[in-house]
Amino acid sequence: MSEHRRKAPQPQGGGRAAARRAAQQPAGRRSDASRRATQESPSAAHGEEPSYGSRAEARRAAQRGGGRRRGGGDSGGHEGRGRGRADSGKKRFIDYPRVGKYGFRRWVPSWKLVSGLCLGFLGLMMGAAGIAYAMVVPPKVLDAAKAQNNVYYWADDTQMVATGGSVNRQKLEYAQIPPAMRNAVISAENKSFDTDRGIDPMGIARAVWNMAKGGETQGGSTITQQYVKNSMLSQDQTLSRKVKELFITLKVGETVSKPKVMEGYLNVSYYGRGASGLQAAARAYYNKDAADLDESQCAFLATLLKGASYYDPAGAPEVDKVAASAKANTERAKERWSWILDEMVKDKKLSAAKRATFDEFPMPIQPRKDAKLGGQTGYLVELATKYFLAHNTENVTEKELAQGGYEIHTTFDRKKVASLEKSIQAVYKAEIDTDKRPDEDTHVEFGGASVDTKTGAIVATYGGQDATEHYTNNADATGAQVGSTFKPFVLAAAMEYGKRNPGLQKEQSASERTPVSPKSMYNGDNKLKITNYDGTVWLNDDNKEWLQTNDGDESYGDISLRYAMERSANSPYVQLGMDVGTDKVKQAAIAAGLRDDEYMADASVPSFSIGTSSPSAIRMAGSYATFATSGKQREPFSVTEVKHDGAVIYQHETKTEPAFPSVVADNVTDVLKNVVEKGTGKPARIPGRDVAGKTGTTDGNKSAWFVGYTPQLSTAVSMFRMDDDETKKNRKFLEMYGTGGETSIHGASFPAQIWHDYMTEAVKGSKVVSFPKPEPYGDTVFGGGAVSPSPTPSPTPSPSESSETPPPPSPTPSSPSPTPSETCAPLDWECRNNQNGGTTNGNGNGNGTEGTTDGSTDGGTDAGTTDGGTDTGTSEGTTEGTTEGDENGRGGIFGGGG
């Protein structure tokens, strides 16, 4: 065989497959294999070149530089290749995945790698923070903290008033700030202020610890942080704002002196009552300059920095009626005030001896109004502000609103507001004379509100003679009882829920009750013994029965509920409330629009039905509007829209709730219409217009009301006397006997006159609309001992739906023999007055009488209507062994009435 066809010799070690396996083995194993191959092949020991299985393998070996250069020996090519990989792994900057490790260990980073990465990341962060810190430029305080105006608009979108802005801010220099104020703030807010660099980690930890224990706390934020937040940043609770706050605080802490930080903080902080800055706060709370504040007053002002809405003793019911009430706020403020003074002693900023002299809380003055908020404007702004804060969905706070920039569009009609004020001022000028009658005519107050029946919009209010002098808004709740103006709710409850069956349990279903018709007959005797629904005598907590009186001690015998409303007789409606359930009466009043709040009286006593509650004029007007709209209730509101920076952030949506069936509401309206046409509400008649309404006078003649409505407008007017010290929490309601030259004041006198004069102007030019004609409803029931007529036809005509003139009351054991006045037709006051020797004075309306006490039941004085005859001369709410009530006109448990 020729030489060139001879098969090439195979390389030692098993061929190419073996070479590949050797290359894949670890270096150590390959070395062992190499030694074995050297021992087995003598030629390798003499430095022979290794053999390759193919030309391609030889080329690859040549490209690698040859096995001899790599590692020497016969297996040097393979060993060098593996060793090259190992060498390159050792030289990697980040050994990950880790070379020489297998399984999960290959993916576990070494401690060197972890620590190196952490140090690198920390270095990068420190570098970035350093760059950010160097680049931070704190914003200008005056540009960010300067408040704008809030602009209030009338219903026609013309401007009413611009409030807020820089008017209530005055900058103080550090030297003008009392040391006591600086010390109080440091002790309360930031004990380390003089030494920290703007951030106090220990203070944050201390605040968290004290919060966990439930004790008084310093804020976690330092004074520097709060200064930055209040003066340089928005109030948004976002991460980016928090980061900005941190860097700006650090910068300010290093670049701004402590006196400047304290000065700025006290100048921009909000103290409530629209006061931004210490000087404005000193004026708002103590009517003095900041430099004149003592340590005790400074400690109180320091409490306000924790949240003025919850520490102002005047309260902030628009924020929270319970938690921010005047009582709750006062208790909270006293506790923190005392704590701050004690902390000042601990910090050696106040001596213990000086602290001992501050044993009485420095009660601030009542909130005052801005001069440009005089007249009615201040009351209107207050109502709109409270309404917006209570109803906005953006959670705008009082503090944010005080910073300004808001446009508040209200429901107030400029002409109607002026007309209501004019009508009341006319009575003041013509009838109230403090020089002539100083004991009777001082402290006379009126309140009023007018509501659009179709929407609930409050179109006019009267809060007092001047918002800058009289701070209580009389259109809001004052504590004045509403008296007989509450009776329509009793009638509505009787018609809707029905009279209870005396033979069944106390709680009865609708099918067990009897719906009551206004034609139902009830006993109208004076000193009627009131019973429970089952006929048992009602007893008070002292186990005494209750004898209900009528005004003038007049007895009517058995009369219809319609006629009892016309005459404002008390006993029928007190007994009706017991038969229906005073809880149902309360339910009807709330459905109509009254609130179940502190001004709703105790509903467990009989007198609840004749008006011992004291809702606001706004609420009374709104609830009567429910009857005007056939039972559809709409919440009174005073704001239609609010804008901020041009964007609408609030818009009112009218919501209608079904309060009563239309047949019930329309029947109540028809009964109240009869009151104005034939009864106590005669002075309120407007020629050519349907008017419904009710008079009310209360126990001790301490308040008088007229509430009435046309189909389009519902208005309530109140009158009362109250001592003039508005700093007192428990102000006294005063009697009105002799006020205005009248023997007594009642709803048909000045309140009805004001209502008439205002409403005549308010409805002028509007469409004449009639009330819906009521459909017959309910059964004619007999209550309070009223006797059902016998089957024998009676010669006396029965009362009709449109007109009732019952016969004179028969003498009863509880009523005297008929007097000459009882021979006159009902409500014929001129006849009665002439028989009593009186003369007509008209009372400004042509309806009044002023007689002598010649046998007249009510002393001869009526001022033109039966409300004077039925609501006067009695101390309703009193009887043998009972008290007349408290000093606030709320009456005893039997108080209130006609």
Image: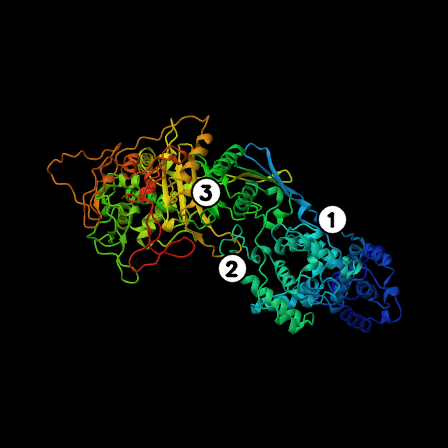
Name which of mark 3 and mark 2 comes first in the sequence.
Answer: 2
Q: At 36% from the left edge and 41% from the top edge, which residue is drawn?
A: 695
Report whether 405 appears left or right of 772. right
**Which residue is at the front of the view, 590 or 87?**
590
Kind of residue at disc 2 = Ala
Q: Quickly name the residue at label 1.
A: 142
Is 715 placed above or below 146 here? above
Q: Quickly name the residue at label 2.
A: 328
Q: At 84% from the left edge and 66% from the top edge, which residue is drawn?
A: 76
The x, y position of residue 577, in whole percent, is: 29, 48
Task: Determine the CA span between mark 3 and mark 1.
Answer: 41 Å
- Tag 3, which secondary structure? helix
Q: Is residue 125 visible?
A: no
Task: Determine the CA span between mark 1 and mark 2.
Answer: 35 Å
- Tag 2, which secondary structure? helix
- Tag 1, which secondary structure? helix
The x, y position of residue 816, in whole percent, is: 21, 47
Q: How crowded is mark 3: few (under 14 residues within 10 Å), some or many (20 or more)?
A: many
**Which residue is at the front of the view, 114 or 860?**
860
Q: Which corner quadrant of the image does residue 567 belong to?
A: top left
The x, y position of residue 162, in whole percent, is: 63, 40
Q: Quickly name the residue at label 3.
A: 618
Name which of mark 3 and mark 1 comes first in the sequence.
Answer: 1
**What label does residue 708 carry, if any?**
none
Name which of mark 1 and mark 2 comes first in the sequence.
Answer: 1
| Quarter occupied by the N terminus | bottom right
